[in-house]
């Protein structure tokens, strides 16, 4: 996994239980955190029309968002997940902050690598099931 965006994408799709457990484990190393935002709401889901190459909004998606800062530093953590589990979004923000602050970064990187592999396997299986439903049609 490379880059901050890839880390956040993986954490956003991570299994809630292990994500929350690791956040609880790392939180004492971070000390007190300042909660900038903890909320749920609706966001527009953007999609791209591949035929015409234009963007459009598919509809609204319910999300939970958390944004934290480590006091006395410029380090911030961010979490945004589909659904309304604010605890899961906060756990994601804690892991993001821990990773960026270098406090438990190795544990976060190992967790994210394991999750990325599991997510890739699940995506492959989904695509395999979808491909099995493909129908070849002849044109006259």
Image (cartoon, grey):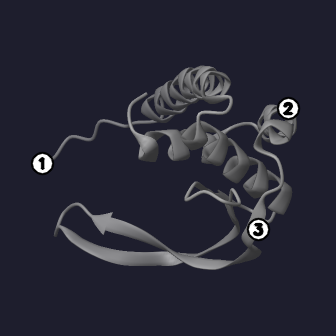
Q: Of callouts 2 and 1, which one flags the residue occurring earlier in the amino acid sequence? A: 2
Marks 2 and 1 close (CB-CB < 8 Å): no
Q: Which of the two residues, 102 or 2, is positioned nearer the viewer here? A: 102
Q: Of callouts 1 and 3, which one flags the residue occurring earlier in the amino acid sequence? A: 3
Q: Point out residue 113 in the picture as x, y percentages from the top left corner.
A: 55, 22
Instruction: Report the residue marked by disc 3.
Output: 35
Q: In the rendered view, does 23 fall on the left or right side of 104?
A: right
Q: Secondary structure at mark 2?
A: helix
All told, the count of numbered labels is 3
Instruction: Report the residue marked by disc 1.
Output: 140
Q: Of callouts 3 and 2, which one flags the residue occurring earlier in the amino acid sequence? A: 2
| Separation of residues labelled 2 and 1 (CA atoms) | 63 Å
Residue at screen point 52% across, 45% down: 9
| Separation of residues labelled 1 and 3 (CA atoms) | 63 Å
Q: Residues within 10 Å of mark 2 (few under 14, many from 20)?
A: few
Q: In the rendered view, does 77 fall on the left or right side of 137?
A: right
Residue at screen point 53% across, 78% down: 59
Residue 25 image label: 2
Indicate the quadrant where residue 17 lies: top right
Location of the N terminus (image quadrant): top left
Q: Secondary structure at mark 1?
A: loop
Q: Point out residue 72 in the picture as x, y percentages from the top left corner.
A: 66, 60
């Amino acid at each position: 996994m490379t880059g901050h965006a890839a880390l956040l994408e993986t954490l956003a799709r991570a299994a809630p239980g292990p994500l929350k457990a690791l956040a609880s484990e790392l939180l004492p190393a971070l000390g007190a955190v300042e909660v900038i935002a903890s909320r749920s709401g609706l966001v527009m889901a953007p999609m791209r029309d591949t035929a015409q190459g234009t963007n459009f909004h598919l509809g609204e998606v319910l999300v939970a968002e958390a944004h934290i800062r480590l006091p006395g530093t410029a380090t911030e953590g961010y979490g945004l997940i589909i659904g309304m589990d604010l605890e899961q979004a906060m756990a994601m923000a804690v892991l993001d902050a821990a990773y960026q602050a270098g406090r438990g970064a190795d544990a976060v990187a190992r967790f994210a690598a394991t999750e990325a592999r599991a997510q890739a396997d699940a995506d492959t299986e989904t695509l395999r099931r979808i491909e099995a439903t493909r129908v070849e049609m002849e044109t006259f």
